[in-house]
Image (cartoon, rainbow, N blue to C red):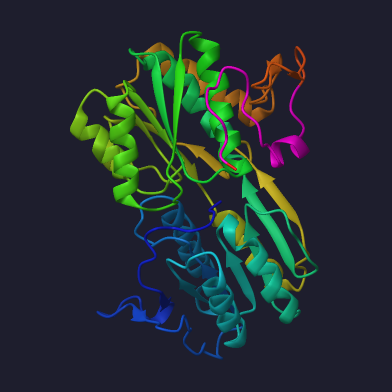
Amino acid sequence: MPGWDPANTGDYTLKRRNLLTSAAVAATLATFGAPVLAESHSVTVGFVYVGPVGDGGWTYEHNEGRLAVEEHFGDAVETVFVESVPEGPDAVRVMTQMALNGADLIFTTSFGYMDQTIEVASKFPDVKFEHATGFKRADNVSTYSARFYEGRAVQGHIAGQITQSNTIGYIASFPIPEVVRGINAAYVHAKAVNPDVDFKVVWAYTWFDPAKEAEAASVLIEQGADVILQHTDSTAPQAAAQAAGNVYTFGQASDMSEYAPMPRVSSIIDNWSPYYIARTQAVIDGTWESTDTWDGIGAGMVGIGEITDAVPAEVKASAEALRDALASGETHAFTGPINKQDGSAWLAEGETADDGTLAGMNFYVEGLAGEIPQ
């Protein structure tokens, strides 16, 4: 997922499994270094995070995947991680240090790490790298992502039916295809159930900055939005909606169920654990190959959090039916007729979007106002 310049860079910490039960679980790495890895483990797996593990969203769920690897493999595998790493030279430094310290497999969990992953991987051909949400691969670099837009479709379906103001706010992070896909999917499905719905998009230019995210939510609420969707990683929009009252929200990347049953009425949950376990097993078995993975609701990589009773029963039932249809492949989130924002034809009646267009999506669909920032 993630993009370019998170405002909250935080401390750069690397935590090791055998320190997690101690009172001091984090060591500040002034030079973005990493500890020497124990040689008793057959495989060491590293994770590079764009946010803090306690963000309650994107990074939290990646870290849950890391913990699942530890639980699954026990002492056969050691994991290490560095959190709150900005995308840029610092990411190169962190990845390089992990590789030098003996990591066999490194997951780089942000879109903005793409070029850095390729750069470092070229210097360590015997280390396997996995880059989340990107599109550049190499012999020792795989890519993986989830079809988050399927979850956005379900959220839009709900949002369009529960809004009273017909104004839905959307907090966007960075103008990359993943985020644009999500906006379009939510809008298409909100519009399908409520032709009068209007979307207002605020670009926060951050993945994790609670202050910015709360401000964006407040601005949208002031503009009449009574439903807030987000593609940023903190729970600050949930808190802002809760303070405002009578504003619905949806959890992003993680369940954010602490805000249920209101304002959080459902969520998109990223489930990375099976993938991380399978790719670690491939390294152990010597069968790892460079691949591209893009799974959705059907494969279990995207989950839909419980729809609370704050949503009318008939809306909940139709949302669950849409979820199931997306999971089975009976329905595609982008099914025509759909035009582009300028009115030109994109998908004809019954036609579905191809993965190539979705992967590089750089346009709004018809009906969305404003421009995608360059």
Residue 347 seen from this side:
yes
Q: Position of residue 39 (x, y in %)?
A: 56, 91
- In the rendered view, would you say 58 is above or below 114? above
What is the chief secondary structure element of the magenta stretch?
A: loop
Residue 306 seen from this side:
no
Toward the viewer: 296 or 234? 234
Instruction: Please check the rendered image and state whether residue 264 is part of the magenta-colored stretch, yes or no.
Output: no
Quarter-wise, where is residue 18 in the image? bottom left
Indicate left or right for 234 with 339 as reference.
left
Name the residue rendered at 58%, 27% in the picture.
185
Q: Which residues are magenta?
A: 352-373
Quarter-wise, where is residue 349 in the image? top right
Q: Position of residue 150 (x, y in %)?
A: 58, 32
- In the rendered view, would you say 325 is above or below 86? above
Name the residue rendered at 26%, 33% in the picture.
241
Indicate left or right for 189 with 243 as reference.
right
Name the residue rendered at 54%, 31% in the picture.
183
Q: Position of residue 257 (x, y in %)?
A: 32, 40
- In the rendered view, would you say 202 is above or below 109? above
- In the rendered view, would you say 264 is above or below 318? below
Q: Which of the image's four quarters has the C terminus?
A: top right
Name the residue rendered at 42%, 46% in the picture.
254
Instruction: Please check the rendered image and state whether residue 369 is part of the magenta-colored stretch, yes or no.
Output: yes
For the image shown, how many numbered marks are present on the structure? 0
Toward the viewer: 304 or 28? 28
Q: Position of residue 240 (x, y in %)?
A: 25, 37
Query: Which residue ends up furthest to the right in the rendered image?
Result: 139
